[in-house]
Amino acid sequence: MSVVGPGGSAPIPWEERPADSSDLVWRSSRNPIIGRHHLARSNSIFNSAVVPFGDGFAGVFRVDDIVRTMDLHAGRSADGVTWQLDPEPIRFEAGDNRVTEIQGAFEHAYDPRVTWLEDRWYVTWCNGYHGPTVGLGYTHDFETFHQLDNAFLPFNRNGVLFPRRIGGAYALLSRPSDNGHTPFGDIFFSESPDLVHWGRHRHVMAPERWTWQSTKVGPGPTPIETDEGWLLIYHGVLTSCNGFVYSMGVALLDLDEPWKMVARARGYLLSPQVPYEQVGDVPNVVFPCAALLDAPTDRLTIYYGAADTVVCMAHTHLSEVLDLLRRS
Ligand code: BMA
C-alpha cells in the first residue's frame, strides 16, 4: 500500500471514536475547524484540500468573499487543525502563453483537490471558462502556483487526479455537468500522456435509484492506493422536497483499470445530520475534498465542506472501510 504524497513529519489530526458511537466515520469534536469569517472579507470557506507538507500541512481553500466571488487561497498549518490562510487569492502563473487566454476569461475557481504526483503538488479545481470546467495547475511550495490548460470543455466539475500514472498515462476522474446546479451526474475516467490532452474517457459509476445517491455522484479526495484497489471517497446527492442533500460514500476501483468498480458501499459514510452541516448558505451538504492517511496506525482523516459555509473533519480507520467494502 502506498501513502499519498511524500508525507509530512507531523502526525495527522486525530480523535478516537467516541465511546458511545458505533459509526464507521465520526466527526471531529473540534468542528468546524475553519469558520466562515476566518478571513476579513470571507463570506464562507469550505470544500477545501489539505495535504501533509514539510513539518506540518498545507492546503488550497475555497473562499467565497463578500462579493460572492469564488476563488482559491493557499494556507498552512502546523497541526492540520489551526490554519493560516493567505488573505489574497492564488494568482497562478501561466504555464505558457495559451494559458493566459483562459486566465483572461476568469469567472471563478472553486472546490480544489491537491494531489502529490511524481515531483510536485498538482491542484485541480472547478474553473469557470464560459461555464464550469476542470482547471489544472501545480506548485512546489504553496507559494508560487503555475496553471496548465483546462482539462476539458465546459461543462465539467470535480476533476480529481490519481497520485501516479496508470498504464503509463496520467489519470483523472471527473463529473461532466451542466452550466447550473446539475440535476444529474456520473463519474468518468480519462487519461493523458502530458496532463494537457485528455481522452479515452470511460464510465466509472452512476447514481443509484431510490438511495442517498440517486441524483448524482462526484469524486471527492485523491483516490488512495490500497492492495485491494483505489479507495474512492465520493459525494452522492439525492433530491428531497427541500432540494439537494449531499452525503459522503465510498467505493473501490480496480488498480490497473480504475474505470472498473470492484466494490461500492450501499449506505453513506456520513450525511448531513448536525447543525453545521444542515444549516448554512446551502443546507444539507457534506462535501469531501481531501483525506490524510497514516498507514502505520490505520488512521484516515477526511476534510469536508459543511453546508457550503465551513471546513470540517471526520475520522475513520482504513481497515474498517475496506472491511465494509469487502462485505458490499
Ligand atoms: C456544487 C458545488 C459545490 C457545492 C455543492 C452544494 O454544485 O457548487 O461546491 O458544495 O454544489 O451546494
Image (spheres, grey):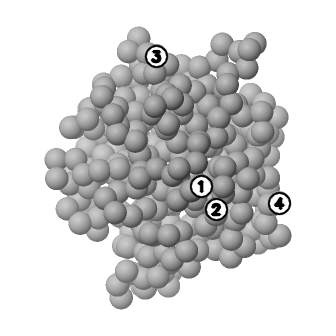
Estimate how packed mark 2 is, as few (under 14), some (14 to 19) or many (20 or more) residues with alpha carbons within 10 Å: many
- What's the residue type where badge 4 is placed? His
The residue identified by callout 3 is: 324
1 vs 2, front mark: 1
- Callout 1 secondary element: strand
Where's the C terminus, which quadrant? top left
- What's the residue type where badge 1 is placed? Gly
4 vs 2, front mark: 2
**Residue drawn at point x = 70 percent, y = 48 percent:** 81
Where's the N terminus, which quadrant? top left
- Marks 3 and 2 sit apart, C-alpha to C-alpha, by 34 Å
**Residue drawn at point x = 45 percent, y = 69 percent:** 139
Mark sitting earlier along the chain (1/3): 1
Query: Disc 4, disc 1: CB below 8 Å?
Result: no
- Callout 3 secondary element: helix
Residue 82 vs 73, above or below: the answer is: above
> Mark on residue 76?
2
- Marks 4 and 2 sit apart, C-alpha to C-alpha, by 17 Å
4 vs 1, front mark: 1
Mark sitting earlier along the chain (1/2): 1
Mark sitting earlier along the chain (3/2): 2
- What's the residue type where badge 3 is placed? Leu
Query: Disc 4, disc 2: CB below 8 Å?
Result: no
- Marks 1 and 2 sit apart, C-alpha to C-alpha, by 8 Å
Query: Does any portion of residue 77 appear in the rendered image?
Result: yes
Query: Disc 1, disc 2: CB below 8 Å?
Result: yes
> Mark on residue 37?
4
- Residue 318 placement, left or right of 201: right
The residue identified by callout 1 is: 56
- What's the residue type where badge 2 is placed? Arg
